Amino acid sequence: MSFYKRYRDIFLVILLLAVPFFFLRTAISRPEDLNAVDRALTTIASPIQFAASAAARTVSGVLSDYFAWVDVGKDNDRLSREVTRLENEVRRLASLEGENERLRKLLGLRESLGIQTASAVVTTKAPTEFFRVAHLAVDAPGTELKKNMPVIALGGVVGLLKVVTGDTATVQLVVDAGFGVDVVVSRTRARGFARGIGDEARYIVRVQDVDRTDDVEVGDLLVTSGAGCRFPKDIAVAKVTEVVKRDFGSYQEVLAQPTVDFSRLEEVLIITGEPRDCEATPRK
């Protein structure tokens, strides 16, 4: 049994080596040179070659699809990184464009005032949602700053400088209880005195000394009167949010919301010169 198995293995090896040789010989021979054995081998080899070719094409197609998929995955990763980079660049450029637009408007405000000012940026704010002080850094080092200099922004009145240290300062906002400014209703020129109330839950000012017969409505814009020559005239201060006219007393109760959005405050102007066209004596 072992003898048969041994010679069987030898025969199979010889056959496996010989068959490809005969197939190759048949494939490269001219048709007129083929004998009966060669033609038989050709007949036998044809379906085998067809099956092998089909299998090879299938494997080749699978491999091609796989490598194409790998390339697509790499391209997707590369494109994804490129999209992220471009999105970041668009955001950066949009931020720069917004900043440039604000600075152009601030320059226009400075020119419209016609008085000496110093530009500054907000460096820090109190860590509370409704803060009442902010810290500034002057753009031009060496600018002489003094306590109680008025601070304005594109939206209107910001407050007054309270602490000055070199080229930095702390500004007291209009909503602080220690702040007050003489105002008029832009629509009717009715006068009052806007004072911060220090509310920790919202930005609000109370307008005092508004005669109960004066025409004041919700939505009216309050602007500086120029009294006291601290703030220039007609700088926005707040918009009226509530009006209460009582049946007794000489004055009506008015609440207003500052026109400046303090949560987005970034650039300001510090008024270092004395405003023109103002009343030297503030209204009592």
Image (tube, rainbow, N blue to C red):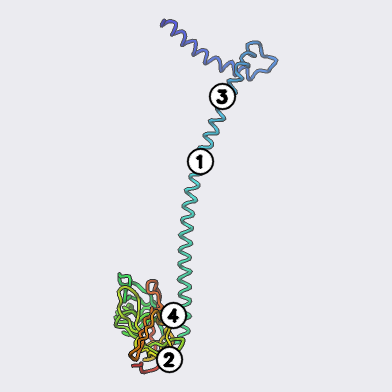
- SS for callout 3: helix
Q: Secondary structure at mark 1?
A: helix
Q: CA distance from mark 1 to mark 3?
A: 25 Å
Q: CA distance from mark 1 to mark 4?
A: 63 Å
Q: Amino acid at mark 1?
A: Trp
- N-terminal of the pair, mark 1 or mark 3, is 3
- Quarter that holds the C terminus: bottom left
Kindly identify which residue carries mark 3.
Answer: 52
Label 2 – label 3 distance at C-alpha: 99 Å
Disc 4 secondary structure class: loop
Q: Amino acid at mark 4?
A: Gly
Q: Amino acid at mark 3?
A: Ala
Rendered image: mark on residue 276 = 2
Answer few, some or many: residues within 10 Å of disc 2's Cα (few below 14, many 20 plus, some between 14 and 19): some
Q: Say whether disc 1 or disc 4 marks the residue closer to the N-terminus.
A: 1
Say the numbered circle drawn on residue 69.
1
87 up-or-down from 244: above or below: above
What x and y, as percent, mark residue 37? 63, 11
Label annotation for residue 194: none
Camera-nearest label, 1 or 4: 4
Q: Earlier in the sequence, mark 4 or mark 2?
A: 4
| Residue sitting nearer the eye, 179 or 186 | 186
Residue drawn at x 34%, y 74% as measured from the top left: 202
Mark 3 or mark 4, whichever is nearer to me: 4
Lower sequence index among marks 2 and 3: 3
Q: Estimate the x, y position of residue 10 in percent, counting from the top left.
A: 47, 10
Q: Which residue is identified by label 4? A: 219
Closer to the chain start, of discs 1 and 2, is: 1
Where residue 19 sits in the image (x, y, percent)?
Answer: 56, 15
Image-based side of 37 in relation to 230, left or right: right
